[in-house]
């Protein structure tokens, strides 16, 4: 149940060295694979980011740290693969004083990157070092041309918000409509269409007007008995919303028009402790899942009353986060306070043991988990151990394939041998990671928030197979 940002401080506008920075400092000593949780930094040592591991990597911040954010769907294209990219966000701050908080609506444009082949098309010639260097130089030049140039441009608009923002979510069908959870115990729904339109039309830098804070009334405001963190819009019924609090109450919001909601004041009760996360089913409009500090996951059907249809023990500690796979709707992922995360096949619930995968890689609380919107077997996880990991559950050890890859690349891949074969990527460099999201319209792009700001990353080994109909 690790939620708050540790010692929130306003970020200073400077580039940060390390894994989460977009700088490309070259290590002075020969590079070696860092084993998270195994290796320790000696005095004077620091981790250096290997730029070749990313197709794109950028760091930015909007002032105060944000516990939660969401990526706003846009009209720039359903499947975008060409750099530079543009992304829209909403976020809520964790300021030092309650009155200093705000909701941020912002746009990051000119996100540059590189296109790479995972294995060179032709093996490098061994005739001379000069030939090899020329080849590398040409490849780098091509990469830069393909990915654009210059630094990303951040444009920001702020709306005043009473108290810290625990969670914020944009509606899938109408992304200008957003819901926010405040530590004051209130859930509010906002219309940010004017701000998003202004950002879409503007090419100004963040320095112009970023200090202005708009005073805007929410469309609706509902008070829970306590503060909370669980919040989810239905992907199937536009405007249908769930909010869950630390008193174990879950409330259903039904839209009565485009800008009004009827909040059921009689809560859904099935947990004995705080409700930490909520997820609507991707295929059943009346079904949702919840997880709790009580260690349980519950599945609900709103047609069957205010008690869960089924409930089961999911972890030995608090269940912090859940994610329902929208490409394989029988799969539900959950992350716990003990650092473990599990994958369940909901079709096996009646048989007792529905766990199809369980990982103990992280040693600190899981803070966020989310399935890829483009690959059914891929998910991303963030933890209080300051690691963001990407997993592909379809992978298994293949020594033959690994040997062939090493031969083609002429590299010695000295990776730790005890890592799970499903672990695709480890991203580090951010402190106190809190939340991550995949970009639904840009395959392979992830965004994460932490105490020291945001990272936009596209790992070079994440290969996405696009649906043929798109």
Image (spheres, rainbow, N blue to C red):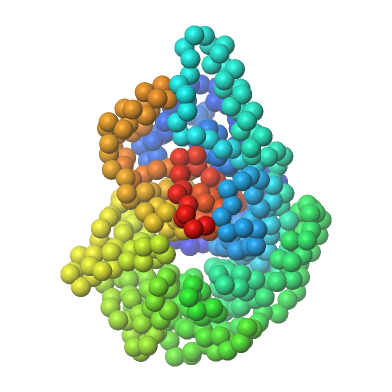
Q: Nearer the viewer, residue 207 or 47?
A: 207
Q: Residue furthest front?
A: 469
The N terminus is located in which quarter?
Answer: bottom left
Q: Residue furthest left?
A: 351
Residue 205 in sight from this viewpoint: yes
Q: Nearer the viewer, residue 180 or 6?
A: 180
Within the image, what quadrant is residue 266 found in?
A: bottom left
Relative vertical location of residue 442 with respect to residue 266 in this rendering, above or below = above
Residue drawn at point x = 34 percent, y = 57 percent: 341
Residue 66 in sight from this viewpoint: no
From the top left corner, tell me how far across and down residue 307 is, in percent: 33, 85
From the top left corner, tell me how far across and down residue 24 is, in percent: 60, 32
Q: Residue furthest top?
A: 127
From the top left corner, tell me how far across and down residue 260 is, in percent: 62, 86
Residue drawn at point x = 50 percent, y = 42 percent: 459
Residue drawn at point x = 64 percent, y = 28 percent: 141
Residue drawn at point x = 42 percent, y = 33 percent: 34
Within the image, what quadrant is residue 449 found in?
A: bottom right
- How many numbered discs, if any? 0
Relative vertical location of residue 344 with respect to residue 464 in this rendering, above or below = below
């Amino acid at each position: 149940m690790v939620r708050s940002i540790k010692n929130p401080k306003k970020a200073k506008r400077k580039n940060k060295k390390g894994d989460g920075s977009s700088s490309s400092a070259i290590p002075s000593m020969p590079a070696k694979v860092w084993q998270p949780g195994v290796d320790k930094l000696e005095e004077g040592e620091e981790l250096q980011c290997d730029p070749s591991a990313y197709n794109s990597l950028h760091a930015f911040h909007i002032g105060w740290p944000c516990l939660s954010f969401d990526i706003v769907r846009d009209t720039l294209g359903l499947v975008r693969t060409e750099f530079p990219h543009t992304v829209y966000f909403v976020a809520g701050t964790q300021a030092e004083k309650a009155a200093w908080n705000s909701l941020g609506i912002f746009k990051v444009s000119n996100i540059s990157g590189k296109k790479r082949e995972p294995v060179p098309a032709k093996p490098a010639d061994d005739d001379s070092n000069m030939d090899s260097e020329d080849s590398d130089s040409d490849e780098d030049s091509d990469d830069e041309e393909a990915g654009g140039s210059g630094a990303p441009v951040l444009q920001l608009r702020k709306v005043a918000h009473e108290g810290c923002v625990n969670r914020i979510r944009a509606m899938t069908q109408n992304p200008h409509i957003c819901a926010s959870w405040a530590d004051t115990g209130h859930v509010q729904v906002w219309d940010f269409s004017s701000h998003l339109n202004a950002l879409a039309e503007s090419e100004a830098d963040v320095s112009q007007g970023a200090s202005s804070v708009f005073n805007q009334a929410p469309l609706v405001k509902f008070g829970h008995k306590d503060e909370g963190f669980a919040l989810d819009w239905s992907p199937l019924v536009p405007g249908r919303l769930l909010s869950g609090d630390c008193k174990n109450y879950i409330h259903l919001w039904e839209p009565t028009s485009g800008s009004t909601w009827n909040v059921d004041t009689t809560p859904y009760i099935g947990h004995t402790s705080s409700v930490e996360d909520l997820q609507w089913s991707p295929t059943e409009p009346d079904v949702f899942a919840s997880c709790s500090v009580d260690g349980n996951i519950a599945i609900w059907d709103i047609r069957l009353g205010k008690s869960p249809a089924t409930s089961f023990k999911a972890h030995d500690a608090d269940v912090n986060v859940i994610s329902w796979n929208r490409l394989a709707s029988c799969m539900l992922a959950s992350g716990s306070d003990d650092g473990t995360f599990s994958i369940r096949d909901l079709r096996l619930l009646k048989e007792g043991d529905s766990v199809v995968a369980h990982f103990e890689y992280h040693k600190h609380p899981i803070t966020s988990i989310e399935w890829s919107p483009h690959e059914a077997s891929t998910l991303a996880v963030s933890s209080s151990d300051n690691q963001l990991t990407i997993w592909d559950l379809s992978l298994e050890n293949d020594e033959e394939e690994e040997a062939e890859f090493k031969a083609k690349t002429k590299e010695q891949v000295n990776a730790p041998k005890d890592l799970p074969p499903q672990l695709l990527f480890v991203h580090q460099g951010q402190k106190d990671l809190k939340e991550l999201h995949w970009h639904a319209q840009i395959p392979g792009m992830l965004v994460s928030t932490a105490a020291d700001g945001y990272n936009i990353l596209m790992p070079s080994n994440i290969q996405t197979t696009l649906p043929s109909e798109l």
